[in-house]
Image (cartoon, rainbow, N blue to C red):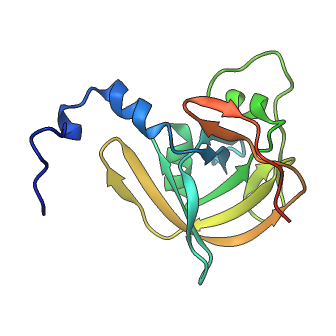
Amino acid sequence: MSRLGSNVKEVTDMADLDFRRHVSFFATGVAVISGEDAAGSVHGVTVNSFGSVSLEPPTVMVSLRPGRAMEIVESTGRYGASILTQSQQHASNHFAGNRDNSEQPTFLTRLEVPTLETCLAWFECEVLDSFTVNDHVLFPARVTACGSAEGDPLIFFASQYHSSPNRLG
């Protein structure tokens, strides 16, 4: 392992807000991770820490903080992921806990796991394992079903929502 030069600030010495500001310059899409509890209620949480891990076999991963959604994923071994369109900022806010007077987004169980009825892409996932990393748990999962619709993604960059560039092709 190499040593950092004396003029480079180590992350452990950096204020949390400095790290948050620097990492916010990595543009991401926005997803809602969902699951159904034992009583049949569907819960969701907004994340920008969802991504593809492997194509063969189709594998994705999400990073979750402790909370209701993480408890459901741990207890059921499944989760849904809905990739949001640029017109779904209200859904992102809703599942991030910033609910307004707009209509609550609706879920649809296409095969086995609930995902948002309207979204850019959806994935039904079966958890392969879990790894605790500091204050989050990583859940790699095999994709058991997926689909997509037309639209442009909701982008999160520099701690703000952005409209996306036009689709290629």
- Residue at coordinates 41% horizontally, 32% vertically from top-left? 20
Q: Is residue 120 above or below residue 13?
A: below
Horizontal arrangement in the rendering, residue 1 relative to residue 116 (left or right): left
Regarding residue 66, the answer to whether it shows in the image is: no
Question: Which residue ends up furthest to the top in the rendered image?
Answer: 101
Regarding residue 118, the answer to whether it shows in the image is: yes
Work out which quarter of the rendered image holds the N terminus and state it.
Answer: bottom left
In front of the other: 57 or 22: 22
Quadrant of the image occupied by residue 46: top right
In front of the other: 157 or 130: 157
Question: Which residue ends up furthest to the right in the rendered image?
Answer: 150
Residue 115 lies, in percent from the top left, at: 76, 52
- Residue at coordinates 60% horizontally, 68% vertically from top-left? 126
Residue 68 lies, in percent from the top left, at: 54, 38
Q: Is residue 133 above or below residue 140?
A: above
- Residue at coordinates 66% horizontally, 21% vertically from top-left? 98
